[in-house]
Image (cartoon, grey):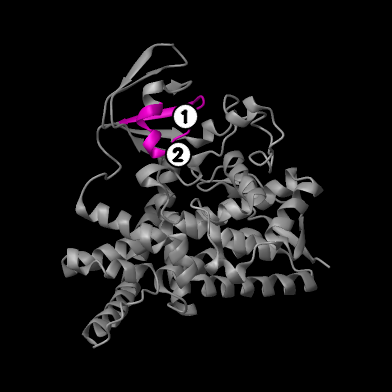
Amino acid sequence: AYIPEFTKELSKMEAKGQLIKSWPPSVINILGPSSLLNEEGDTSNIGRKTFAEALSTRSILNQSLPGIVSIVNDMKKKWEKDAETGETITFADDFSAITYSVICTAIFGVDGVNAEELAIIRKCTDNIAKGLFSLPIDKPVLRGIPFFRRYPRAMQARRDMKVLLLEKVKQRKAAIQKHQASSSNDSFESTGMLDSFLLQADVMSEDALIDFCVDNTILSIFAGYDTTASLSTNLILLLHEYATPEELTQIRLELEELDIENLSQKDIPAEGILDLVPSLKSAAYESFRYRTVVGGTFSKTTAPVTVTSSSSQSLIEIPANTTIQWSHLVGSRSPTLFDEPEKGCPLRFFNTNKDQEKQQKEQFPPFIFGYGKHKCPGRYLAQIEMALAMKAFLCNFDFHVEPNQNTDAAPPFMKPKSGLKLKLTAKK
């Protein structure tokens, strides 16, 4: 059903989920009562609560910041060498390497995995992604060939990763039990998300707890590694194609003022660290809007909703407890919500000189990290990673996009097919 806008009932119903008040013309897929979203159940509630605690901005800054800073500094050294030698970099690959290391630091703690284990995790995750995204959708005869080759490989990769993660679970579980058996009155200090999951032992059986830890760890790595890297790569391409020198300078100045050493002592805005660098936040949101890395957002109606079809103007009844999907690929280019939607505008969501009507029209689209119960649990980690990595990159280097490369969006995460090849020059 093509929906021009939701009714007031839908706006009220979804207000608690922080949806924008008026959705633009977009594709709404009505998926029916069979829920893709697990709203109930002890395991789901425990997972949501644990993610919220372990991946909060404060937890990340207290537990993982030194590790994240070290990861970014190592990449900065590589970029310095590349700038000195004139080596072409593939930005998506470099940022992907940062993302894998950052996610594993947040999960396992600083130095929680060695280089060999990180390589295994990365190889397994890549194979899982290749298998799952080779489903024969359009042309079964042609697409079925890579699917039948890659999908079994993806399942084997998941089993291989599970072996490694089971060992990590046992190591951290032993550390927790050792502390609990000691005479220390101090509470156990979690080193990362895995510890936070294991501390749920009092509400789960041992077998269920191990499966819970392994499955959620795989999910966290798989869901986070390529989305952040793709969004950041598309951000650099957006700046190349559309940012004026003044806009790029504004972003750099804000990043230079970001005091990384004292972040742990700073009051971070509730929405995350990007609020400290509003120009970068605007560019990141515009990058997501202009070249979205997530095809759609799912939600579930909590009450019956009536909407109007734009094609026939007929009323469509959507029952309560119906899963629906909103297409970012269509909605993000909607002229109802965005002025000149086919044009990239890095400071679209920062410019306060617009008239009141435009300011009300172009609010920050909340769907960059989802909304409500199903908002991305890694959103604060992604913001910290992006802010630190962009500070290291934009404040220290000028970048030049290499000619004759294919920057068309490559599914599933819509990053440039070439990975975005750049030449760097160290800033003086």
Left or right position of 26 against 82: left
Does the stretch in magenta take in 95? no
Q: Which mark is residue 414?
A: none
Residue 331 in percent (x, y) is at 52, 31
Of residues 186 and 313, the one nearer the viewer is: 186
Of residues 128 and 74, the one nearer the viewer is: 74
Q: For the residue carrying disc 1, how many other residues have a C-alpha within 10 Å: few (<14), some (14-19), or many (20+)?
A: some
Disc 2, SS? strand
Q: CA distance from mark 2 to mark 1?
A: 18 Å
Res. 232 in view: yes
Disc 1, SS? loop
Q: Disc count in the image?
A: 2
Above or below, 175 against 22 in this view is below
In the rendered image, which quarter contains the C terminus? bottom right
Determine which quarter of the picture holds residue 338.
top right
Identify the amino acid type marked 2. Answer: Gly
Residue at the image position 64 percent from the left and 31 percent from the top: 341
Q: To which residue does mark 2 refer?
A: 296
Residue at the image position 37 percent from the left and 52 percent from the top: 148
Determine which quarter of the picture holds residue 152.
bottom left
Q: Residues in magenta? A: 11-31
Residue at the image position 60 percent from the left and 72 percent from the top: 261
Residue 108 in percent (x, y) is at 40, 73
